[in-house]
Each structure stands twice: as C-alpha cells, then as structure tokens.
Image: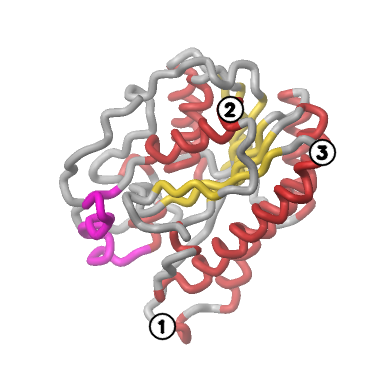
Amino acid sequence: MTESGGAAAPIPPQTQEWPGTTAELDPTPDHGESSWRGRERLVGRRVLVTGGDSGIGRAVAVTFAKEGARVLLTHLPEEADDARATVEAVERHGGEALAVAADLRTAEAVDTVAARVRDELGGLDVLVANAAYQMTHDAIEDFPPEQLERTFATNVFSTFLLVRAFARDLERSGGNVVVTTSVQAYQPSDHLLDYAASKAALTNLVVNLAQELGPRGVRVNAVAPGPIWTPLIPATMAADTVEGFGSTTPLGRVGQPVEVAAAFVFLASDEASYVSGTVLGVTGGKPVF
C-alpha cells in the first residue's frame, strides 16, 4: 500500500499564510500518488470529498480514484491551485476528478454543491465530509467570537447539512458517509479549544446519524486522525509548535495523508459492509476512547 511507515526525519520549523499550500511543505507529504496500489475496491462509486484540495482530502481523492471511484472534490476559492494539483494527480493515474470551489458553511452553498454532484455524477454513493477549519491561540481570551462561529460552521454545520442534502441519494444507492473527526475529540489541546470541541461534536453526530440512517441502508462512520502532515499545520500553528510535529506519538513520528486515506478506503468499501457508527483512529498510537 504505502512505504510511509517506520522512522521519519523530524519536521523542521516553518510557517505559511492561511490556508497554506502543499507546494511549500517541507518535507513533501505522501498522498498516495506513487505509493498507493489500488485493488478495485470502489469501482464505479460516485464520491464527494469536501476539502479535497490538499492534505487528507487530496489523499482520499487520489486513493479513491485509484480504487476506481469517480470523484468530485470541493475547495475554498483561495485553494484553487492545490485543487488543480489534486485533479492532475488523479488524472495522471487514469482517474476521474472534478474540482468545485465552494464554502460550505451555509445551506444554500451545500444545496448548490448537491445539485452539481447530481448533474456531474448522476447521484452519490460515498460522502466524505472532510473540510475543516482551525486556528490556534494561547489563551481562551485570544479566541475571537467570529472564529468560534467559523470553526463550528465549517466543521459541524456543513457536515450536518451535507448529510441532510444527500440522505435520499445515499438511500437510493445504498451508500455511506465517512466523516473526518480528530484525536482532538479525545485528547484536546488547550490551544485548539474550539476545534477540539467541534470534533467532539462530530463524533457524537456520527453515532447519531448511524442510528438515524441505518434503517435506510446508509452506513455512517468516522476517521479520527492524529498529527498528520498537511498544509493546515504550518498555516495555523507557530513555527516552534510545528517543529517536531508528531514526534510525541507512541510511534514517534508524524503521519502521512495516505495513511489516513487507507482508513477511508476501508470504511467506504464493501469490506466494511457491517461497520457503522464507529470511529477509526489513525493516530500513531494516541488513544481514541
């Protein structure tokens, strides 16, 4: 699958302007472009990946396409360059992907994307709710109220609205939902107060949605990443925090986006046909309970 395991060089200190870009990351992350070997586990599946321009979203788009899926990914307008790079990475390996600029914090934006998915893909088999926002601060007094609103709107409200918009599509296709939560839901960092709380809310939402949609034949699961090397890290954290990122995990290193994507592939595939309402941790050994 991937050669990302084992020892890895420590992450050097670095910063980027938000929202960050893959091209400036040192070292370059592994999204599975060369390391992933597809086994036709998602042939013909129609997939929406939110936040698919970089990081975990890019790795999900690449690996799903290598497994035979058709992918529509969303990104913020300012992430257009990374989104094009994701589409190019998919197409280089014979896959099919389409990038759509969208800020999914409102029901209107979600409904617009839903219409685009139906026009372009003819329906939906897998919804990957991955788009997220975070920004770190040292003390609670430093968190602007508008950031709290943006974090929950991006991370939680958009996920709820996406599932609401696609519930009937997924029921018709016998599809499933995979949500990106975080180890922060279980081991919150004080400088990520709002982000950690939003991920805890998502964990609860996933369990509830599995109960709600299970009788309709729709599975709902989540993946909880630990420290993963993506543009979000240097774009939202101080350089001294970024230095050595991931080294405190039991495995002693940062995770690669493709290592998280492997969990998404499993949960979206028929191999997980009796798995619903669960959170699969990809954390380098940090507990998710």
Farthest bottom residue? 141
The residue carrying mark 3 is 216
The chief SS type of the magenta part is loop
Residue 75 visible, this angle: yes
- Which residue occupies 45% across, 42% down? 56
Asked if residue 279 is among those painted magenta in the image, a careful observer would answer: no
Residue 282 at x, y percent in the picture: 41, 46
The reply, left or right, for residue 27 in relation to residue 99 is: left
Quarter that holds the N terminus: top left
Query: The residue under label 3 is which amino acid type?
Result: Arg
- Residue 117 appears in which quarter of the rendering? top right
Q: Which residues are magenta?
A: 237-254
Tell me: residue 70, above or below residue 256: above
Marks 2,1: beta carbons within 8 A: no
Residue under the image location 52 percent in, 17 percent down: 95
The x and y percentages for residue 126 are 66, 33
8 or 239, which is in the foreground?
8
Callout 2: few (<14), some (14-19), or many (20+) C-alpha neighbours within 10 Å? some
Instruction: Name the residue tied to disc 2.
Output: 269
Q: CA distance from mark 1 to mark 3?
A: 44 Å
Please, what is the three-letter code of the amino acid marked with disc 2?
Ser
Foreground tag (2 vs 1): 2
Disc 3 packing (10 Å; few <14; some 14–19; many ≥20): some
Residue at image position (74%, 33%) is 116
Badge 3 or badge 2: first in the primary sequence: 3
| Kind of residue indicated by mark 1 | Ala
Q: Where's residue 4, x and y in %?
A: 27, 34
Question: Percent from the top left, x then y, of residue 115?
Answer: 79, 35
The residue singled out by tag 1 in the image is 139
Alpha-carbon distance for marks 3 and 2?
18 Å
Q: Does residue 248 show up magenta in the picture?
A: yes
